[in-house]
Image (spheres, rainbow, N blue to C red):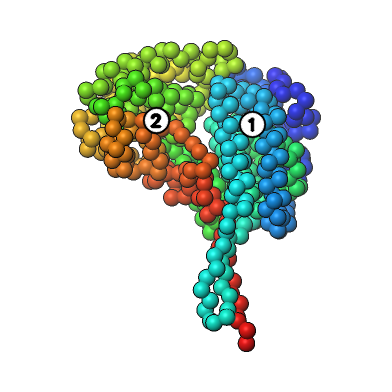
Amino acid sequence: MAVIGEGWPDRAEWAGRIFSAGWRESDGGTRPVIEPATGDTLADVGIASPADVARAGVRAAAAAGEWAAAAPSDRVAVLLRASGVLRDRSDTFREWIVRESAGVPAKGDYEIAAALAQLAHAVGLASLPRGEVLAPQAPGGTSLAWRVPLGVVGVINPWNAPLLFAVRALAPALALGNTVLLKPDPLTPVSGGVLVARLFEDAGLPDGVLHVLPGGADTGQAVAADPHVAMIAFTGSTAAGRAVARVAGEGLKRVLLELGGKNSLVVLEDADVEAAALAGAVSTFGYQGQACVAAGRHLVHTDLVEAYTDALVRHALAMRVGDPREEGVGIGPVISVGQATRVERIVDESVAAGARVLTGGRREGLFYPPTVLDRVDRAMPAYTEEIFGPVAPVLPFRSEAEAVEIANDTAYGLAAAVHSGSVPRATAVAGQLRTGMVHINDVCAKDAANAPFGGMGVSGNGSRIGGTASLEQFTQWRWMTAPGPS
């Protein structure tokens, strides 16, 4: 068994256990964590059964009142200490992210920096004004409305950005006085769960406020169904999001869904081709394309399509494929055999239907090289499906109206990017795209702690996380009146 991060966290304490008011053996047994690049077993973690989730729900509900009543300054102090622990232990977090999720070290650095930004933003969120003085219903009376914690929040996260997505939901939920059941994906239960538990444990978070419950679909369904859970914050595929929403809907719970995308990067004829192609390469090939905000279509004006495609191919060929721990490697393996098979199937079926592979297109084990496709039409899987792999389908267009029509030809509506030499022109095109997020002369894949992150269509349910949207998501209104003097 490969050993990572000797000394912290103490493997003897957490190996094979779950975190629920301390480290405990689980009813769900254990599961090995496999390194995608090598096939090595990195650790064994505890898997939470539905019974484990039920016990954690009781403990979280019992802790909710005291945590909600804590002074904002006390909650802020925990978040600030957590930031310090994350900085001090960044090498351990980076190594686990690289080896567990198969991202290059720069991807680990990004997650750490973004998680720190989320913690910093949550510090401010804890003391934002949260109420209104309303006009009284009778002279001399009082009418007040303010936001209060929901109680217990369930957070269900995917494997592709395990640390960031955990902290993105945890930080505002905790800052605003909620307790949390966190279910990390079983593919990344350490960087998305064990380390997060130790981070907040070392920061002095009171017992019972956070519970970390790794597991698969049955564990997630138990979290969504638990009667003590008032809200579910889910990040993952649209299909899984629908399943979670159905379960949570039976309990009339609030549901925050951040789901998939089939995102377009639009290149108008007056764009800087080299800059656009670099943004396109980063948007599709970064972290093997395994991001909901990855560019799934490259829509390029016919005047530029040859130059753009040539530049995109150059970027693809310059990326070395291999073990992300090795010097100079730009792209590691995809996360699993199932995901590698999916990418391969989408490309092969598209090629059989007439698409052309300009570079890449053949996998070796879990390693799929950066791939560029042209001659893509609207009937092909490369056009219609979210690939979640390092594949760039390039489609030409002749007018802005055609570009907008192609970009909007999807049920998804998460993110987009528009490239042009004229920012006002690009902004006008961006305003016609049915997406929750759009970026001018930049990548599709962007994130910021102070921005409302989320999508339209089947990319979500209209909910957002980040910025003041988190205040809305993780609290609810209470109205109180009192009569005036009699």
| Amino acid on which the number 1 mark rests in the picture | Ser
Relative to 141, residue 81 above or below: above
Instruction: Find residue 281 and report its image quarter.
Output: top left
Could you say which is closer to the camera, residue 32 or residue 468? 468
In the rendered view, does 172 fall on the left or right side of 58? left
Residue at horizontal 43 percent and vertical 24 percent from the top: 282
Relative to 144, residue 402 above or below: above
Q: Residue furthest left?
A: 398
Could you say which is closer to the camera, residue 409 or residue 200? 200
In the rendered view, does 204 fall on the left or right side of 39? right
Q: CA distance from mark 1 to mark 2?
A: 29 Å
Query: In the rendered image, which quarter contains the N terminus?
Result: top right
Mark positioned earlier in the residue sequence (1 or 2) = 1
List x then y, in percent, for residue 139: 54, 82
> Viewer-nearest of labels 1 and 2?
2
Q: Is residue 395 visible?
A: no
Could you say which is closer to the camera, residue 125 or residue 349? 125
Is label 1 in a helix, a strand or a loop?
Answer: helix
Relative to 22, residue 108 above or below: above
Q: Residues within 10 Å of mark 2 (few under 14, many from 20)?
A: many
Residue at horizontal 20 percent and vertical 30 percent from the top: 398
List x then y, in percent, for residue 269: 24, 27
Instruction: Find residue 301 and report its image quarter.
Output: top left
Q: Which residue is mark 2?
A: 442
List x then y, in percent, for residue 483: 60, 80
Residue at horizontal 28 percent and vertical 40 percent from the top: 428
| Amino acid on which the number 2 mark rests in the picture | Asp
List x then y, in percent, for residue 365: 51, 17
In the rendered view, does 366 fall on the left or right side of 213? left
Q: Which residue is mark 1?
A: 191
Is label 2 in a helix, a strand or a loop?
Answer: loop
Residue at horizontal 63 percent and vertical 46 percent from the top: 123
